[in-house]
Image: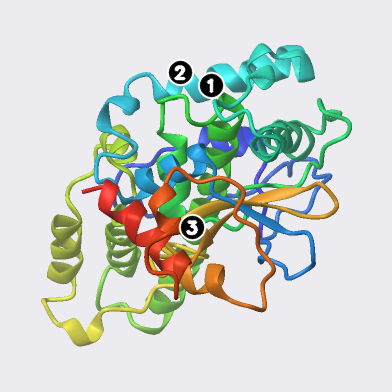
Amino acid sequence: MTHFSVEGLLAYRSFKAGSANAVIQRDAAPSKSSPGPQAVGSDTGVKVTLSPAATKISLLLKNESAGKASAAVGFDEFVESNHQQIKAQGKNADFLKEVPQDPSPERQVLAQQAANYLLSHHYGEEKLHSNRSAENPFAALDRVTLSKISFDDSGLFTTAERQVAFLEMTNRDLVHRNETYELSETLQRTDDSAPWFMVTSYLRDAQLLGSMSEGEKAWRNWPPATELEAFAASMLRNDPSREPTLPEYQNLNNQDNPILAYVVGKDGSGSWQNLAVEDLASDTMPLKLIQSLIEKSKTSQPEHPWLSLYLSIDSLSR
């Protein structure tokens, strides 16, 4: 996957709905870490942590008000200020020293790793936490989760984590934008009976709207997805058979894996993961539940305690 420079990501972080243009990568950012998605491993010693913070985050992801609209206020200033601080101060930028609310060692590891990744991958700077990994802890998450983390101003995530989540999401968006543009070029060459650049752009953005938090929707201020789809349909003379199949967006909306947890490996590096209940119950994955707010799961439904835990979490969000 293309990796855009941090300057490019911030310059092209916002587009009007239906904008039909590609983004040219000029100067690639120095990369010292592998940004690819990481699967949950089965090595002994791997732990899935549903700590109080992680449990709250799972609730957050099921809550329609997550990433609330008010978080859009000042968001541009937020990401730009973080960028300018690192450019001016490097690893001495104050926001990089923030710690998460959850004091557990595993949660601290993830926050420190995010700060390291931000410095190393996007700015080519030396790590702030020399004893921590600089791998991307958010690489495995879907776009829905990244959007909610980016626009969550509750303090649940550190500023560095929100910045990393937003840059990761924006990089994927730009890759998808370019792939969609390439599709429209191909369509236009073979069939000039429709304005394919506009058709694919409106369909692309209608799809993206379904993966946005309320905060991101307020920040972008796009028309509803139904309106964008109607624009595209009108350009195709309302002939559904002509609607093109868009390129696949990498990990757009992973609804089948509703539990958010963080995984820490034997090497000390960690990552956030969207997990299914079946993964937690699997005998092939040695996992250890070390904390939980849901105490009643210990006694209810003993034949499937992981399912009981998830149902308890789910009931709290209603």
Furthest residue in direction front, as rendered: 299
Label 3 and label 1: CA atoms lie apart by 24 Å
Q: Amino acid at mark 2?
A: Glu
Residue indicated by mark 3: 142
Quarter of the rendering occupied by the N terminus: bottom right
Q: In the picture, residue 86 is in which quadrant?
A: top right
Residue indicated by mark 1: 80
Left or right: where 300 falls relative to 250 = left
Between label 3 and label 2, give the one nearer the viewer. Answer: 3
Label 3 and label 2: CA atoms lie apart by 25 Å
Residue 77 is tagged as 2
Residue 172, above or below 63: below
x and y, in percent, of residue 13 in the image: 47, 38
Q: Residue at x 73, y 59 (%)?
A: 46
x and y, in percent, of residue 141 in the image: 54, 55
Q: Report whether residue 107 is seen.
A: yes
Left or right: where 158 falls relative to 122 = left
User: Which one is in front, 245 or 268?
Assistant: 268
x and y, in percent, of residue 71 in the image: 34, 27
User: Which one is in front, 53 or 241?
Assistant: 53
Kind of element beneath mark 3: loop
